[in-house]
Protein backbone atom coordinates (compact mmCIF):
# COMPACT_ATOMS: atom_id res chain seq x y z
CA UNK A 1 0.00 0.00 0.00
CA UNK A 2 1.18 3.55 -0.74
CA UNK A 3 -0.38 4.83 2.50
CA UNK A 4 -0.18 3.85 6.15
CA UNK A 5 -3.20 2.98 8.26
CA UNK A 6 -3.78 5.15 11.31
CA UNK A 7 -2.72 2.87 14.20
CA UNK A 8 -5.15 1.68 16.88
CA UNK A 9 -5.26 3.98 19.90
CA UNK A 10 -4.23 2.39 23.21
CA UNK A 11 -7.11 4.10 25.03
CA UNK A 12 -9.64 2.10 23.00
CA UNK A 13 -8.62 -1.18 24.63
CA UNK A 14 -10.36 -1.11 27.99
CA UNK A 15 -9.24 -3.56 30.67
CA UNK A 16 -10.25 -4.15 34.29
CA UNK A 17 -6.96 -6.00 34.80
CA UNK A 18 -8.96 -8.80 36.34
CA UNK A 19 -8.57 -12.37 34.99
CA UNK A 20 -12.03 -13.16 36.35
CA UNK A 21 -13.62 -10.30 34.40
CA UNK A 22 -11.96 -10.12 30.96
CA UNK A 23 -13.13 -7.52 28.47
CA UNK A 24 -12.85 -7.44 24.70
CA UNK A 25 -10.12 -4.85 25.17
CA UNK A 26 -8.06 -7.66 26.72
CA UNK A 27 -8.75 -10.04 23.84
CA UNK A 28 -8.77 -8.11 20.55
CA UNK A 29 -5.18 -7.38 19.58
CA UNK A 30 -4.08 -4.05 18.11
CA UNK A 31 -1.99 -4.39 14.97
CA UNK A 32 0.06 -1.56 13.50
CA UNK A 33 1.29 -1.47 9.94
CA UNK A 34 -1.47 -2.92 7.79
CA UNK A 35 -2.83 -6.30 6.67
CA UNK A 36 0.59 -7.79 6.00
CA UNK A 37 1.37 -7.48 9.71
CA UNK A 38 -1.70 -9.43 10.84
CA UNK A 39 -0.87 -12.84 12.38
CA UNK A 40 -1.76 -15.73 10.10
CA UNK A 41 -4.24 -17.27 12.55
CA UNK A 42 -6.40 -14.13 12.56
CA UNK A 43 -10.03 -14.62 11.57
CA UNK A 44 -11.52 -11.08 11.82
CA UNK A 45 -9.98 -7.63 11.44
CA UNK A 46 -11.76 -4.48 12.58
CA UNK A 47 -11.10 -1.49 10.35
CA UNK A 48 -12.37 2.06 10.77
CA UNK A 49 -13.31 4.44 7.98
CA UNK A 50 -13.53 7.89 9.68
CA UNK A 51 -14.96 9.72 6.70
CA UNK A 52 -18.24 11.61 6.33
CA UNK A 53 -17.70 13.84 3.30
CA UNK A 54 -20.13 11.65 1.38
CA UNK A 55 -22.86 12.46 3.90
CA UNK A 56 -22.17 16.19 3.70
CA UNK A 57 -22.12 16.14 -0.11
CA UNK A 58 -25.58 14.60 -0.07
CA UNK A 59 -26.92 17.31 2.22
CA UNK A 60 -26.85 15.19 5.37
CA UNK A 61 -25.56 15.84 8.86
CA UNK A 62 -21.81 15.53 9.29
CA UNK A 63 -20.30 13.78 12.31
CA UNK A 64 -20.16 10.10 11.35
CA UNK A 65 -16.40 10.38 10.89
CA UNK A 66 -16.28 9.92 14.67
CA UNK A 67 -18.33 6.73 14.51
CA UNK A 68 -15.52 4.17 14.48
CA UNK A 69 -13.89 5.69 17.56
CA UNK A 70 -17.19 5.93 19.49
CA UNK A 71 -18.18 2.34 18.69
CA UNK A 72 -14.81 0.96 19.74
CA UNK A 73 -14.88 2.76 23.08
CA UNK A 74 -18.04 0.83 23.99
CA UNK A 75 -17.20 -2.43 22.21
CA UNK A 76 -13.94 -2.96 24.06
CA UNK A 77 -15.71 -2.60 27.41
CA UNK A 78 -17.95 -5.59 26.66
CA UNK A 79 -17.10 -9.02 28.03
CA UNK A 80 -16.37 -11.93 25.65
CA UNK A 81 -19.66 -13.51 26.72
CA UNK A 82 -20.21 -17.23 27.22
CA UNK A 83 -18.61 -20.09 25.32
CA UNK A 84 -15.13 -18.85 24.46
CA UNK A 85 -15.94 -17.80 20.90
CA UNK A 86 -13.98 -14.54 20.99
CA UNK A 87 -10.85 -16.35 22.16
CA UNK A 88 -11.15 -18.71 19.19
CA UNK A 89 -11.62 -15.89 16.68
CA UNK A 90 -8.11 -14.43 16.97
CA UNK A 91 -9.50 -10.97 16.28
CA UNK A 92 -7.41 -7.86 15.61
CA UNK A 93 -7.95 -4.12 15.22
CA UNK A 94 -6.01 -2.53 12.37
CA UNK A 95 -6.94 1.04 13.20
CA UNK A 96 -8.36 3.40 10.59
CA UNK A 97 -8.06 4.10 6.90
CA UNK A 98 -6.56 7.61 6.71
CA UNK A 99 -8.81 10.06 4.85
CA UNK A 100 -7.36 11.03 1.49
CA UNK A 101 -7.22 14.46 -0.10
CA UNK A 102 -10.45 13.53 -1.89
CA UNK A 103 -13.30 11.21 -1.05
CA UNK A 104 -12.35 9.08 -4.04
CA UNK A 105 -8.86 8.63 -2.62
CA UNK A 106 -10.33 7.53 0.72
CA UNK A 107 -12.44 4.95 -1.11
CA UNK A 108 -9.46 3.63 -3.04
CA UNK A 109 -7.56 3.15 0.22
CA UNK A 110 -10.44 1.22 1.76
CA UNK A 111 -10.80 -1.01 -1.31
CA UNK A 112 -7.09 -1.83 -1.25
CA UNK A 113 -7.19 -2.69 2.45
CA UNK A 114 -10.30 -4.87 2.19
CA UNK A 115 -8.76 -6.70 -0.74
CA UNK A 116 -5.51 -7.31 1.15
CA UNK A 117 -7.40 -8.76 4.13
CA UNK A 118 -9.56 -11.10 2.07
CA UNK A 119 -6.56 -12.31 0.10
CA UNK A 120 -5.24 -13.55 3.45
CA UNK A 121 -8.62 -15.13 4.30
CA UNK A 122 -9.27 -12.53 7.02
CA UNK A 123 -12.81 -11.24 7.42
CA UNK A 124 -13.06 -7.42 7.07
CA UNK A 125 -15.40 -5.82 9.61
CA UNK A 126 -15.58 -2.15 8.61
CA UNK A 127 -16.87 0.66 10.84
CA UNK A 128 -18.10 3.88 9.25
CA UNK A 129 -18.32 6.61 8.44
CA UNK A 130 -20.79 7.35 5.69
CA UNK A 131 -22.64 4.67 3.76
CA UNK A 132 -20.78 5.64 0.60
CA UNK A 133 -17.91 3.48 1.91
CA UNK A 134 -19.82 0.31 1.00
CA UNK A 135 -19.08 0.62 -2.70
CA UNK A 136 -15.34 0.64 -2.09
CA UNK A 137 -15.66 -2.25 0.34
CA UNK A 138 -17.47 -4.23 -2.37
CA UNK A 139 -14.72 -3.39 -4.86
CA UNK A 140 -12.26 -4.94 -2.43
CA UNK A 141 -14.42 -8.06 -2.11
CA UNK A 142 -14.85 -8.50 -5.86
CA UNK A 143 -11.17 -8.04 -6.69
CA UNK A 144 -9.88 -10.20 -3.82
CA UNK A 145 -12.20 -13.12 -4.58
CA UNK A 146 -12.03 -12.63 -8.37
CA UNK A 147 -15.81 -12.58 -8.62
CA UNK A 148 -17.36 -12.59 -12.07
CA UNK A 149 -20.78 -11.63 -13.38
CA UNK A 150 -23.52 -12.33 -10.87
CA UNK A 151 -21.22 -13.96 -8.31
CA UNK A 152 -21.73 -11.39 -5.53
CA UNK A 153 -24.81 -11.17 -3.33
CA UNK A 154 -25.53 -8.10 -1.21
CA UNK A 155 -27.94 -7.38 1.65
CA UNK A 156 -28.48 -3.77 2.68
CA UNK A 157 -30.18 -3.38 6.09
CA UNK A 158 -31.34 0.21 5.91
CA UNK A 159 -34.24 2.65 5.94
CA UNK A 160 -33.12 3.96 2.54
CA UNK A 161 -32.53 2.40 -0.86
CA UNK A 162 -29.30 4.39 -1.41
CA UNK A 163 -29.44 4.19 -5.20
CA UNK A 164 -29.42 7.91 -5.97
CA UNK A 165 -27.77 9.09 -9.16
CA UNK A 166 -24.45 10.93 -9.13
CA UNK A 167 -25.68 14.46 -9.80
CA UNK A 168 -24.10 15.57 -6.52
CA UNK A 169 -21.11 13.31 -6.98
CA UNK A 170 -20.40 10.45 -4.59
CA UNK A 171 -22.70 10.66 -1.57
CA UNK A 172 -23.92 8.36 1.18
CA UNK A 173 -27.04 7.88 -0.96
CA UNK A 174 -25.24 6.43 -3.99
CA UNK A 175 -23.38 3.22 -2.97
CA UNK A 176 -25.77 0.64 -4.37
CA UNK A 177 -26.43 2.52 -7.60
CA UNK A 178 -22.67 2.40 -8.11
CA UNK A 179 -22.51 -1.25 -7.09
CA UNK A 180 -25.14 -2.26 -9.64
CA UNK A 181 -23.58 -0.17 -12.40
CA UNK A 182 -19.84 0.01 -11.78
CA UNK A 183 -18.48 -3.01 -9.91
CA UNK A 184 -15.84 -4.97 -11.86
CA UNK A 185 -17.19 -7.77 -14.06
CA UNK A 186 -20.82 -6.83 -13.22
CA UNK A 187 -20.32 -8.92 -10.10
CA UNK A 188 -23.60 -7.72 -8.55
CA UNK A 189 -26.85 -8.25 -10.42
CA UNK A 190 -30.21 -7.06 -9.19
CA UNK A 191 -31.51 -10.59 -8.63
CA UNK A 192 -28.87 -11.10 -5.89
CA UNK A 193 -29.41 -7.78 -4.11
CA UNK A 194 -31.83 -7.41 -1.20
CA UNK A 195 -32.89 -4.09 0.31
CA UNK A 196 -34.03 -4.95 3.85
CA UNK A 197 -36.10 -2.79 6.22
CA UNK A 198 -36.75 -0.03 3.68
CA UNK A 199 -39.21 2.64 4.85
CA UNK A 200 -41.59 3.76 2.13
CA UNK A 201 -42.18 7.35 3.37
CA UNK A 202 -38.46 8.13 3.16
CA UNK A 203 -37.73 6.89 -0.36
CA UNK A 204 -38.45 8.37 -3.75
CA UNK A 205 -40.91 6.40 -5.93
CA UNK A 206 -38.51 7.08 -8.82
CA UNK A 207 -35.68 5.17 -7.13
CA UNK A 208 -38.02 2.42 -5.99
CA UNK A 209 -39.08 1.94 -9.59
CA UNK A 210 -35.40 2.00 -10.62
CA UNK A 211 -34.49 -0.93 -8.36
CA UNK A 212 -37.62 -2.91 -9.25
CA UNK A 213 -36.76 -2.62 -12.94
CA UNK A 214 -33.43 -4.28 -12.09
CA UNK A 215 -35.03 -7.20 -10.24
CA UNK A 216 -33.83 -6.04 -6.83
CA UNK A 217 -35.77 -7.52 -3.91
CA UNK A 218 -37.17 -4.80 -1.64
CA UNK A 219 -38.31 -5.95 1.80
CA UNK A 220 -39.99 -2.94 3.38
CA UNK A 221 -40.32 -2.43 7.11
CA UNK A 222 -44.10 -2.72 6.69
CA UNK A 223 -43.85 -6.06 4.89
CA UNK A 224 -41.37 -7.46 7.41
CA UNK A 225 -43.73 -6.63 10.26
CA UNK A 226 -43.03 -8.71 13.35
CA UNK A 227 -41.14 -11.41 11.42
CA UNK A 228 -37.72 -9.84 10.73
CA UNK A 229 -35.72 -13.02 11.29
CA UNK A 230 -37.90 -15.02 8.94
CA UNK A 231 -37.49 -12.36 6.28
CA UNK A 232 -33.75 -12.10 6.86
CA UNK A 233 -33.37 -15.83 6.28
CA UNK A 234 -35.18 -15.33 2.98
CA UNK A 235 -32.83 -12.42 2.18
CA UNK A 236 -29.86 -14.73 2.82
CA UNK A 237 -31.38 -17.29 0.46
CA UNK A 238 -31.90 -14.73 -2.32
CA UNK A 239 -28.44 -13.17 -1.97
CA UNK A 240 -26.79 -16.58 -1.78
CA UNK A 241 -28.50 -18.24 -4.73
CA UNK A 242 -25.96 -18.71 -7.52
CA UNK A 243 -23.35 -16.45 -5.87
CA UNK A 244 -19.93 -17.16 -4.40
CA UNK A 245 -20.00 -14.55 -1.63
CA UNK A 246 -22.42 -12.27 0.21
CA UNK A 247 -21.63 -8.81 1.55
CA UNK A 248 -23.74 -7.37 4.39
CA UNK A 249 -24.12 -3.65 4.97
CA UNK A 250 -25.94 -2.31 8.04
CA UNK A 251 -26.97 1.32 8.27
CA UNK A 252 -27.81 2.00 11.90
CA UNK A 253 -30.71 4.22 10.82
CA UNK A 254 -32.58 0.97 10.17
CA UNK A 255 -33.32 1.03 13.92
CA UNK A 256 -35.97 3.31 15.41
CA UNK A 257 -34.63 6.58 16.80
CA UNK A 258 -35.67 5.76 20.37
CA UNK A 259 -32.85 3.21 20.39
CA UNK A 260 -30.56 4.79 17.78
CA UNK A 261 -30.78 8.57 18.19
CA UNK A 262 -27.23 8.93 16.90
CA UNK A 263 -27.96 7.71 13.37
CA UNK A 264 -27.10 10.24 10.69
CA UNK A 265 -30.73 10.15 9.50
CA UNK A 266 -32.77 8.74 12.37
CA UNK A 267 -36.57 8.49 12.44
CA UNK A 268 -39.15 7.12 14.91
CA UNK A 269 -39.88 3.96 12.95
CA UNK A 270 -37.52 1.06 12.35
CA UNK A 271 -36.31 -2.30 13.54
CA UNK A 272 -36.00 -2.89 17.28
CA UNK A 273 -32.49 -3.15 18.71
CA UNK A 274 -32.83 -6.84 19.73
CA UNK A 275 -34.08 -7.65 16.23
CA UNK A 276 -30.98 -6.14 14.64
CA UNK A 277 -28.74 -7.98 17.09
CA UNK A 278 -30.40 -11.29 16.18
CA UNK A 279 -29.95 -10.49 12.50
CA UNK A 280 -26.27 -9.80 13.15
CA UNK A 281 -25.93 -13.13 14.96
CA UNK A 282 -27.51 -15.02 12.05
CA UNK A 283 -25.24 -13.19 9.64
CA UNK A 284 -22.19 -14.09 11.69
CA UNK A 285 -23.10 -17.77 11.49
CA UNK A 286 -23.57 -17.61 7.70
CA UNK A 287 -20.36 -18.83 6.05
CA UNK A 288 -21.35 -17.34 2.69
CA UNK A 289 -21.01 -13.83 4.16
CA UNK A 290 -17.46 -12.62 3.53
CA UNK A 291 -17.70 -8.92 4.36
CA UNK A 292 -19.69 -6.64 6.66
CA UNK A 293 -19.82 -2.92 7.34
CA UNK A 294 -21.70 -0.92 9.98
CA UNK A 295 -22.27 2.71 9.04
CA UNK A 296 -23.82 6.12 9.76
CA UNK A 297 -23.27 6.22 13.55
CA UNK A 298 -22.98 9.94 14.29
CA UNK A 299 -21.64 10.69 17.81
CA UNK A 300 -22.68 14.39 17.90
CA UNK A 301 -26.31 13.26 17.53
CA UNK A 302 -26.10 10.43 20.04
CA UNK A 303 -27.67 10.54 23.50
CA UNK A 304 -25.98 8.86 26.47
CA UNK A 305 -24.02 6.66 24.02
CA UNK A 306 -27.17 4.68 23.19
CA UNK A 307 -26.37 4.34 19.49
CA UNK A 308 -22.71 3.52 20.09
CA UNK A 309 -23.83 0.86 22.57
CA UNK A 310 -26.24 -0.59 20.02
CA UNK A 311 -23.52 -0.71 17.38
CA UNK A 312 -21.18 -2.42 19.84
CA UNK A 313 -23.90 -4.97 20.55
CA UNK A 314 -24.37 -5.61 16.84
CA UNK A 315 -20.62 -6.27 16.53
CA UNK A 316 -20.68 -8.56 19.56
CA UNK A 317 -23.48 -10.73 18.21
CA UNK A 318 -22.01 -10.87 14.72
CA UNK A 319 -18.67 -12.00 16.11
CA UNK A 320 -20.31 -14.52 18.42
CA UNK A 321 -22.10 -16.03 15.44
CA UNK A 322 -18.89 -15.96 13.39
CA UNK A 323 -17.15 -17.93 16.13
CA UNK A 324 -19.76 -20.66 15.68
CA UNK A 325 -19.13 -21.10 11.97
CA UNK A 326 -18.15 -24.67 11.12
CA UNK A 327 -14.47 -25.43 11.44
CA UNK A 328 -13.45 -22.29 13.32
CA UNK A 329 -13.26 -24.04 16.66
CA UNK A 330 -12.09 -27.44 15.42
CA UNK A 331 -8.44 -27.10 16.53
CA UNK A 332 -9.48 -26.43 20.15
CA UNK A 333 -11.95 -29.32 20.18
CA UNK A 334 -9.32 -31.72 18.88
CA UNK A 335 -6.89 -30.53 21.53
CA UNK A 336 -9.50 -31.06 24.24
CA UNK A 337 -10.25 -34.55 22.95
Image (cartoon, rainbow, N blue to C red):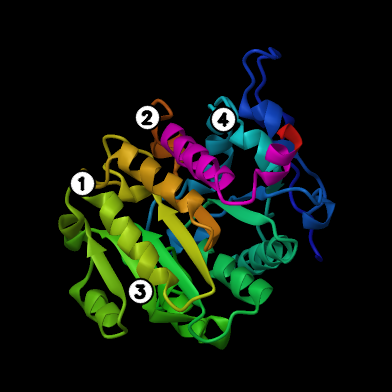
Note whether 143 is above or below 89 in the view shown: below
Is the residue marked by circle 3 packed among few (<14), some (14-19), or many (20+) residues within 10 Å?
A: many
Q: Main secondary structure of the magenta part?
A: helix
Q: Is residue 240 left or right of residue 288?
A: left
Q: How far is the residue under mark 2 from the one under mark 1?
A: 17 Å
Query: The N terminus appears in which quarter of the rendering?
Result: bottom right
Q: Say whether residue 159 is visible.
A: no
Task: Give the x, y percent position of residue 141.
Answer: 60, 69
Q: CA distance from mark 2 to mark 4?
A: 32 Å
Query: Between marks 4 and 3, how big is the CA–CA gap?
Result: 43 Å
Q: Which residue is mark 3?
A: 164
Q: Residue at x 64, y 51 (%)?
A: 327
Asked whether the beta carbons under mark 4 and mark 3 sit within 8 Å of each other, the answer is no
What SS does tag 2 mark? Answer: loop
Q: Which residue is mark 1?
A: 269
Residue depicted at x 27% and y 54%: 230
Q: Foreground: 91 or 130?
A: 91
Residue 273: image location, x then y, percent = 33, 38
Residue ranking furthest to the front: 337
From the image, state whether disc 4 or disc 3 is nearer to you. Answer: 4
Which residue lies under the disc numbered 4?
83
Q: Earlier in the sequence, mark 2 or mark 1?
A: 1
Q: Which mark is residue 303?
A: 2
Segment colored magenta: 309-334
Q: Tell me if residue 236 comes above or below residue 145 in the rendering.
A: above
Query: Which tag is nearer the camera, tag 1 or tag 3?
Result: 1
Amino acid sequence: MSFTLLPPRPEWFFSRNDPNDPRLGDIVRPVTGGPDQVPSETRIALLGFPEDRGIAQGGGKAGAAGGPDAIRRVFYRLTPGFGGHFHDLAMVDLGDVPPGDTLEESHERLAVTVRALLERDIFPLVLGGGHDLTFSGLVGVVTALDLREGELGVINVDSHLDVRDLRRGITSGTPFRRALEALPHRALLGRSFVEFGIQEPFNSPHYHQWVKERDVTVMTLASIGNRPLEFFLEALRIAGEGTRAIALSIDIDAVRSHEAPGASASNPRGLKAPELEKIAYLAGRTEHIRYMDLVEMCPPLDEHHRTASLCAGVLFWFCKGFGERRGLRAPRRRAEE
